[in-house]
Image (cartoon, grey):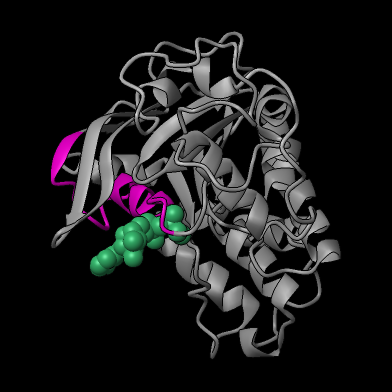
């Protein structure tokens, strides 16, 4: 299914979602809608609230406010039904190290309620996808980091989910292994699976996503096509109070594929353009530089 003929029910719908940890508001009135068949990259620096959001989508963590629907199911009330239709790749590897590759996968065919007659086929397909054919009998603690990560991803695909949540799927991996995982994620995209993938690698978001949402301080501060966002934010100044620029810069900072931020260019301040950004720029009640300022002269951020 392509994004063009996406059905009316959104894969993900979050409205005003809030999550607090004591005095810290990790997710702060988050609004996000992802149509079916879209790969959305959730890009933001550490601490932006990406993992907390992912955990609320699976009801591992309960929201303090707002509404969440996953494939039309209300969360948390109908999370059992939503979970049956989605696969989850957690940020931290939680494979059972003492079990073999095959045993890890088989265990999840039970959890995902894959019918008995399809279990062997589902495990074989997963091992093929993860390029682990012939390694079914190997204990997980004997695998390389890249193999483990591939196994973690295909484990989430055993029941052919319509929606896959991936929390920083390639963090800490070397470039070659990351390329392998990108192929795996691209294949999902080609099959029309909806993917929400958090990342702080800009290159990854650019390469794999149909759309990118920039997250900062528990909110989406900007959203658009990867090309548009790169055009708009690449080259943004390093220090800024604009949440969209900070999210971009923070992500950029963590990327191994890019170096240090380039110097501020002389061009119209994009801070004046996006509403989400304009309303939150420190000191700007309206639009102080009215699009005329350059990065160097904009007094708003
Ligand atoms: N269980 C928790 N208890 C207290 N604070 C938490 C907990 N989980 C996350 N946080 C805090 O919430 C904020 C958002 O965290 P997280 O969602 O993990 O961000 P991200 O995944 O974008 O790096 C951070 O400040 C983090 O320290
Ligand atoms: Mg995280």
Give the residue displayed 55% in from the left and 59% down from the top. Answer: 119
Q: Is residue 138 magenta?
A: no
Rendered-image quadrant of the N terminus = top right
**Is residue 73 among the parts visible in the rendering?**
yes
Give the residue displayed 70% in from the left and 56% down from the top. Answer: 255
Image location of residue 230, percent across then percent down: 71, 31
**Residue 110 location, quadrant:** bottom left
Image location of residue 238, percent across then percent down: 62, 47
Image location of residue 16, percent across then percent down: 22, 30
Using the image, determine if residue 132 lies above or below residue 117: below
Give the residue displayed 67% in from the left and 25% down from the top. Answer: 232
Using the image, determine if residue 138 lies above or below residue 211: below
Give the residue displayed 47% in from the left and 64% down from the top. Answer: 108
Judging depth in this view, the residue of 185 and 201 nearest the camera is: 201
Using the image, determine if residue 43 lies above or below residue 142: above
Image location of residue 295, percent across then percent down: 63, 29
The part of the chain drawn in magenta is 47-66
Q: Is residue 65 magenta?
A: yes
């Amino acid at each position: 299914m392509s994004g063009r003929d996406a059905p009316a029910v959104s894969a993900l719908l979050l409205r005003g979602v809030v999550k607090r940890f004591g005095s810290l508001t990790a997710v702060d009135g988050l609004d996000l809608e992802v149509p079916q068949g879209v790969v959305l990259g959730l890009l933001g620096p550490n601490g932006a609230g990406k993992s907390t959001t992912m955990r609320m989508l699976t009801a591992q963590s309960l929201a303090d406010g707002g509404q969440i629907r996953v494939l039309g199911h209300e969360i948390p009330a109908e999370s059992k039904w939503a979970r049956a239709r989605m696969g989850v790749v957690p940020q931290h590897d939680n494979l059972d190290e003492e079990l073999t590759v095959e045993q890890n996968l088989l265990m999840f065919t039970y959890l995902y309620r894959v019918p008995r007659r399809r279990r062997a086929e589902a495990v074989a397909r997963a091992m093929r996808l993860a390029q682990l054919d012939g390694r079914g009998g190997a204990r997980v603690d004997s695998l390389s980091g890249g193999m483990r990560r591939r196994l973690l991803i295909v484990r989430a695909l055993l029941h052919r989910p319509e929606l896959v949540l991936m929390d920083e799927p390639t963090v800490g991996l070397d470039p070659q292994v990351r390329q392998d995982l990108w192929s795996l994620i691209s294949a999902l995209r080609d099959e029309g699976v909806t993917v929400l993938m958090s990342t702080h690698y800009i290159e990854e978001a650019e390469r794999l996503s149909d759309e990118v949402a920039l997250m900062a301080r528990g909110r989406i501060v900007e959203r658009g096509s990867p090309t548009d966002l790169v055009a708009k934010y690449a080259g943004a100044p390093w220090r800024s109070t604009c949440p969209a620029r900070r999210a971009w810069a923070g992500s950029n900072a963590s990327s191994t594929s890019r170096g240090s931020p380039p110097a501020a260019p002389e061009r119209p301040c994009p801070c004046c353009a996006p509403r989400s950004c304009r309303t939150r720029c420190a000191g700007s009640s309206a639009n102080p530089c009215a699009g005329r300022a350059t990065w160097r002269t904009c007094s708003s951020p």
